[in-house]
Image (cartoon, coloured by chain):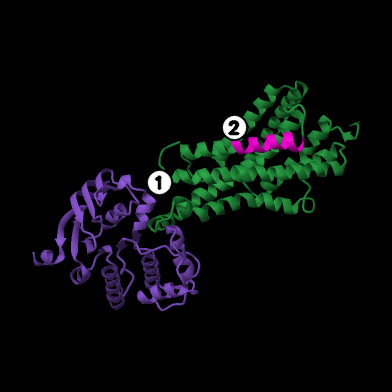
Amino acid sequence: MFRLEKVRYKHILNIEKLEIPERKVVCVFGESGAGKTTLLRLLNHLISSDSGQIFMYNEDITQLDPIQLRRRVVMLPQTPIVFASSIKANLLAAIEFSQKTVPTDEVMQDVLSFVKLAKDLTTQAQKLSGGEKQRMALARVLLLEPDVLLLDEPSAALDEETENIVISKIVEYVKQKNRSLVMVTHSKKVVSDYADYTIELEQGRVKRAGVTACLLEA
Amino acid sequence: MSTGSVIDIGFWQLASAYVFIGLLLFIVRARGINREKEIIIASVRMTIQLVLVGYLLAYVFENNHPLWTIIMLAIMVTFAIFNIYKRVRVPLTLRVKRIIAFAMASGTLFSLVYFLLVVLRVYPWYDSRYFIPIAGMIIGNSMTGIALGVNHLVEGIHKQWATIEGSLMLGATPQMAVKDIVNDAFDSALLPTINSMVGMGIVFLPGMMTGQILSGVSPVTAIQYQIAIMLGIVGSVALTVILFVHYGYQAYFNSRAQLVEVTESA
């Protein structure tokens, strides 16, 4: 799906070659400062590399419309944005951004249930806890039904139990809908439990990349 | 002592008005407020500037010529643009400075031409007695408005950097991502002008109207001018600020719709 060739970004990332397969759960793993978030930002085209090329389905992403690209390849940051309004308004903001058809309240409530957020649509989003905001933001991304989900530590603000539930739900969604997921994580458990494909970064370089089972055996 | 209905202020009468500055200096000295130097400099500057502008305007009014009018207009617009650069609290890039200059020049010029030719129907169009004071009011108010707009827009973008990026990540266009910030900047820039309209005639009598009344013009005529100029000012402030905010936010995005920190020196 994505192919990176000789990609450099400041002193943060220096990737000689990297392939990211489609319709898989891909985990990007590594220490803090390894360049994981920068990699996602490059794939979302929120930033451009200083040199090298990134291809999406063999097309150089600099040749694609950046807005249309981001609507297909949606990114959820580690600290998601929360607008000072209701959960419903927060969900609809993303729909407005991506110019998709407005879903019914029932559909929105279903997505909230899916990410285990038992809140009413009228609840003020700023009153939610950190973990609840994260799940609301996740629901917002799922509502967009993108081809590719780029999630930057989606379980960072969650306790272990909720983390398990939420990650398994995301993975279930991706498999069901035949989508692609690229997820940054610190957790080795998440990698071993869910990743089809793993990329390990170290100081901006790809240390290892491959099918998770093979990497874990190695 | 008086010429027609206007009281002519003699030299010693004017000099006696400086008693107020003496009073101010006495207060700040007595209270130990370290502001004497600024008060003296401000008083001297105000006096010299107004004396010079008085003689300059007298010369321009007596030698009514389109070239003089255009030169005066160019000086006023240029001064206003540089004054905005100085008054803005945030660092400005060359691109943003150019947008400010464009918005100021085109917005005020359009409003001025419309006001003089359509509303007042001044003939000849360059009649400096009308052109210069009206241009001064329109340019001065637009300058204040756009300075507020610049501060709010640039500060808004920096404070809400993460929100803008978060919106872009979800597929927003740059225009969608900064919509609230742009609207807030426009609103903040217009608010003082709208507030001054609300208080006008009750809380205070505006300067132009007061000047006309003092020079013997009927208050009814004076309010007609005041209403017209106030509407012209609102229009000009709105036009210059909307031009600035519309093009100003674009300076923070590159051709790939990425939010970029503009670091070029100006």
Q: Position of residue B8 (x, y in %)?
A: 86, 32
In the image, which disc is placed on residue B234?
none
Q: Colour of chain A?
A: purple
Magenta stretch? B105-120
- Find disc 1 in the rendering and name its residue: B261
Quarter of the image holding residue B230? Answer: top right
Q: Position of residue A141 (x, y in %)?
A: 37, 65
Left or right position of A108 against A203:
right
Quarter of the image holding residue A163? Answer: bottom left
The amino acid type of the residue labelled 2 equals Thr
Question: What quarter of the picture does the N terminus of chain B occupy?
Answer: top right
Q: From what the image shows, is residue A163 above or below residue A30?
A: below
Write the residue at 72% across / 45% down. B231
Front residue of this view, candidates B137 and A165:
A165
Quarter of the image holding residue A1? Answer: bottom left
The amino acid type of the residue labelled 1 equals Glu
In the image, which disc is placed on residue B78?
2
Q: Residues within 10 Å of mark 2 (few under 14, many from 20)?
A: some
